[in-house]
Image (cartoon, rainbow, N blue to C red):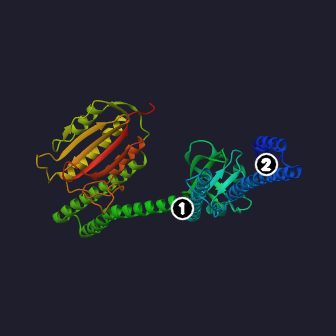
Amino acid sequence: MKFEHKNLLFILLSGVFSFIIAGILLWCSGIAPVNKICITTVMLLFWAVPAYCIQSRINYSLRTMSNLLGSLREGDYSFRLKGASHNDSMGELVWEVNALTEMLQENRLTAEESSSLLRKVLAEIDIVLLGFDEKGYISLINESGEKLFDLKQSNYAKYNAQQLGLSQCLTGPARQVLDLTLPSGSGRWEIRRATYREKGLPHQLLVLTNLTRVLHDQERTAWKQLVQILRHEINNSLTPIQSVAQSLQSCLNDGIEDKDNLADLKDGLDIISTRAGILARFIDSYSKMTHLPVPKYESINISEWINHAASLEQRVKVKVISGPESEVAADRSQLDQLLINIIANAVEASKDSPSADGDIVQVSWQVSDTELTVWVDDSGQGINTEKDPFIPFYTTKTEGSGIGLSLGRQIAEAHDGSLELIPSPLMSGCRAELKLPLTHNL
């Protein structure tokens, strides 16, 4: 039985008892039979017609609500119901439905705007985004990915990671750098992997960044800087050597019996020896930069290491502000070289400008749960923002090699740490901040 018929039956049953009682009373009275029939007919009409009207009213409300829900299901949020009110139950229902419709419409507009913005961002960024379902097939791809793999938006879902040569990207670390052979050619790519859910199922998101161009640009810049430095250093040595050699040739042509010529010959040979020594030290410095050995880890007492390195500075007394007693896992010889170079640079930067209390270099440290931080503060002129002090062979000192800070950063990074120069909060100069992890797999 249909819901409408059930409603009509229940409405009629609600009045059947009254109708029967009234009929019994009517037919047991002394009214004429014709009048009884007329009154019974009228009673029947007053019973059936209101029941039908009530049933129609209920069906109309339900059909209207059904049409509204159908519109919402199809995404049409412009439909509204009349009769919203807080005075009766149906009015409250209508009000709530209208409020729900308005909220869904606002949410859809917000979602569409956000989706449009996301599509534009994904289309503009120069990285490849790929989403793979649980079977390894593509479920998401941006415009850069379509161009890279020569795919069309309509048929990308039939390709899987193996067909694209990305199987190894879905395994291993979530962040890695791999050499991949793709339709655009071979190159080095940074791979980042994350997980997300779509329709309740797990998916994997791959973010591919092409490092080849960046590495080539950095390589060209590094070679350019290296060539400039080599040309500068070699010219600084070869130019005086060439000039002195010509002068010595003249002395030889004039004869070496003359005492003045002998003195000039001796001075010229000294100049050649000095410049050759400087050039040899430069080449040796370059060798140190390119042949840093792998750290041999051991447990090092932090206080003993810092005080020992500070005591080796004989030009001035380095003030050591003691920190917590602890140990760090590192290569002792490399850490000594690192800290000695930092302290030496700090002393040379601030020899002529001591602080108000007479100290020119202070060394301090602190220890957290996982990290050691060492600070070396000086009272020099501060950081020169025009030049990067970590560039290899860059130096402001006449006798400097220019590798102290760059070698120090290389040692720190080899220990999974860092070395930075920042303005000193304690003194007038700068602060060298060294950070090292406390533990390592020994």
Residue sitting nearer the eye, 389 or 83: 83
Q: Which residue appears at 30% of the width and 55% of the height?
A: 278
| Nearer to us in this view, 268 or 411 | 411
SS category of the residue bearing label 2: helix
Is residue 126 in view from this perspective? no
As shown in the figure, which amino acid type bears the numbered disc 1? Arg
Farthest residue in the right direction? 33
Whether residue 48 sits left or right of residue 208 in the image: it is right
Q: Position of residue 323 (x, y in %)?
A: 25, 34
Mark 2–mark 1 CB contact (< 8 Å): no
**Within-10-Å neighbours for mark 1: few <14, some 14–19, many 20+:** few
Local crowd size for mark 2, using a 10 Å CA cut-off: few (<14), some (14–19), many (≥20): some
Tell me what residue is drawn at x 63 percent, y 64 percent: 78
**Residue placed most toward the observer, 150 or 421:** 150
Residue at numbered disc 1: 213
Position of 400 with respect to 95 (left or right) is left
Circle 1 — which element? helix
Image quadrant occupied by the C terminus:
top left
Residue 38 on image: x %, y %: 85, 53
On residue 288, which mark appears? none
Tell me residue 121's x, y (percent).
Answer: 55, 63
Indicate left or right for 353 with 228 as reference: left
The reply to whether residue 384 is visible in this rendering is yes
C-alpha span from label 2 to label 1: 78 Å
Looking at this rendering, what residue extends furthest in the left direction?
357
Mark closer to the observer (2, 1): 2
Residue 57 location (% of width, % of height): 72, 55
Identity, as a three-letter code, of the amino acid under mark 2? Leu
Residue 160, compared with residue 330, is above or below; it is below
Which residue position is annotated with label 2?
A: 8
